Image (spheres, grey):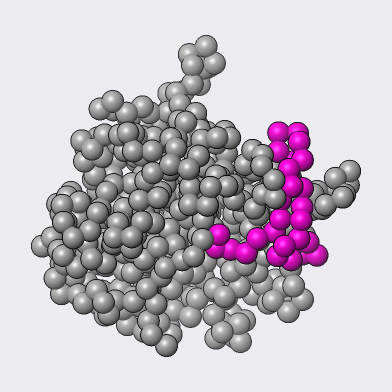
């Protein structure tokens, strides 16, 4: 997240996805050649295409109809190509605008893209012991958050230290925490938080949860260099110039009460705007109508390639219960106070890895020679040792619209993680030369507070 495609009608095509698909757009699994610079989304269409009747089994039950966000009709009206994702119907792209072009628009000076991310789980945590609930589940120093500020954090497994989900926790001046986590982990995260609430209440603690369902509360992500100018044009009660990265506030946007947080999942400056679902269309249309910035709609295809260029993890692909924050290069999410207290889930494993180092590490990968892009599960081999065991595996990959060549994220054994080291990727049964790269792959433009 930092963390999450979907569904049908009005000319759009619905294709049920495999149940095992991770809760985020699996661009890493698309066929090669799908996202050439400024190109179309042929590979994504292949992923989401309806299976032919001759391959369908009559013994299979009909797929469950995907849920719709409050903006479903809005997307259809704007020629959104709807696909199923994480139980919801969301646009992968709009009309004739390719995923590559949408991606490049998001990064262009004076431009911004608007994403519907209402499928994500929004939660309010109230009560004087609200911080205790989130600290019982995450590695964050929630108590130490300044009013109207937030942090990226992770739910971690108590035994293994593995990542159960990534999420953003914001402390507000309204005596509540505002939490956003991944749609594909909705049921898991709700159960995890409800069990923690029950335990704390049994101890006499004051805490309560409220899950904001998509039919009640919507979430828009406005991302790109022109995002601040676009928001400023229609927002009241917020000085956008003083709302820095990971700061949050209540404000009116197009006259609608909203929670505005400066964050996003693209590597660009931007905002996530939460509002009552009845106001979602009004806010979206007002942002598109702003004359001072070029705002256009974008779908989950561009969202995935943007986050990959920014080196951001995708839950279910780059991080999951089998990876710890240290292995994933996210050790900075383990707050100093929590390290000292060793009181977070999985502390024994994570603190040992912080001291001794992990056996594997997340790395960036770029090609040394032309060849097909590496996708998820591509094996990584040490240079000159192609006949030996693989040293790692790619977890996400795609052609980069900004760079004009392929990029990938993966894990390798720690002795091989040095930037610049050459490796071999086994792509389509042929070895392709690549090298370990720094991440992010492109410069990020977060609007940071002055030091």
Q: Is residue 121 above or below residue 425?
A: below
**Quarter of the figure with residue 73:** top left
Instruction: Residue at 59% x, 47% y: name it.
Output: 406
Residue 378 vs residue 313: left or right? right
Residue 314 is situated, as x and y percent measured from the top left of the image, at 52, 54
Q: Is residue 318 above or below residue 31?
A: below
- The span picked out in magenta is 414-441
Residue 434 vs residue 56: left or right? right
Residue 204 is situated, as x and y percent measured from the top left of the image, at 40, 79
Residues 185 and 409: in front is 409
Residue 195 is situated, as x and y percent measured from the top left of the image, at 47, 63
Magenta highlight on residue 84? no
Residues 335 and 43: in front is 43
Residues 301 and 403: in front is 403
**Quarter of the figure with residue 420:** bottom right
Instruction: Residue at 48% x, 80% y: name it.
Output: 141
Viewer can see residue 334: yes
Residue 250 is situated, as x and y percent measured from the top left of the image, at 22, 72
Instruction: Residue at 64% x, 38% y: name it.
Output: 372
Q: Is residue 193 above or below residue 101?
A: below
Magenta highlight on residue 425? yes
Viewer can see residue 206: no
């Amino acid at each position: 997240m930092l963390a999450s495609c979907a569904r049908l009608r009005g000319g759009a095509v619905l294709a049920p996805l495999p149940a095992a698909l991770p809760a985020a757009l699996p661009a890493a699994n698309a066929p090669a050649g799908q996202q050439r610079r400024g190109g179309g989304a042929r590979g994504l269409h292949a992923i989401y295409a309806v299976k032919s009747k001759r391959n369908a089994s009559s013994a299979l039950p009909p797929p469950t109809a995907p849920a719709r966000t409050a903006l479903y009709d809005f997307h259809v009206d704007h020629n959104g190509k709807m696909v199923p994702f994480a139980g919801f119907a969301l646009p992968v792209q709009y009309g004739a605008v390719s995923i590559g072009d949408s991606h490049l628009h998001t990064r262009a000076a004076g431009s911004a893209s608007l994403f519907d991310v209402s499928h994500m789980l929004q939660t309010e945590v109230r009560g004087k012991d609200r911080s205790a609930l989130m600290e019982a589940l995450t590695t964050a120093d929630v108590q130490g958050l300044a009013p109207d500020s937030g942090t990226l954090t992770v739910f971690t497994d108590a035994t293994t230290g593995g990542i159960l989900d990534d999420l953003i926790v914001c402390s507000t001046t309204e005596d509540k925490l505002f939490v956003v986590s991944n749609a594909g982990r909705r049921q898991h995260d709700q159960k995890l938080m409800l069990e923690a609430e029950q335990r704390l209440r049994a101890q006499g603690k004051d805490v309560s949860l409220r899950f904001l369902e998509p039919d009640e509360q919507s979430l828009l992500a406005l991302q790109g260099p022109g995002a601040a100018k676009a928001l400023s044009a229609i927002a009241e009660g917020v000085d956008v110039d003083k709302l820095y990265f990971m700061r949050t506030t209540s404000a009116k946007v197009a006259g609608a009460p909203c929670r505005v947080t400066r964050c996003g999942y693209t590597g660009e400056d931007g905002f996530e705007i939460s509002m009552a679902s009845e106001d979602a269309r009004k806010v979206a249309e007002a942002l598109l109508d702003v004359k001072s910035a070029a705002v256009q709609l974008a779908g989950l295809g561009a969202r995935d390639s943007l986050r990959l260029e920014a080196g951001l993890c995708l839950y279910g692909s780059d991080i999951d219960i089998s990876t710890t924050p240290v292995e994933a290069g996210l050790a900075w999410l383990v707050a100093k106070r929590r390290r000292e207290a060793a009181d977070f889930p999985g502390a024994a494993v994570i603190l040992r890895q912080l001291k001794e180092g992990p056996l594997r590490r997340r790395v960036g990968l770029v090609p040394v020679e032309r060849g097909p892009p590496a996708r998820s599960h591509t094996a990584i081999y040490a240079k000159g040792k192609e006949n030996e065991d693989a040293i790692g595996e790619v977890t996400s990959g795609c052609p980069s619209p900004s760079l004009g060549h392929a990029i990938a994220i993966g894990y390798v054994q720690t002795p091989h993680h040095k930037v610049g080291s050459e490796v071999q990727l086994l792509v389509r049964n042929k070895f392709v030369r690549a090298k370990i790269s720094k991440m992010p792959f492109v410069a990020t433009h977060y609007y940071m507070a002055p030091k």
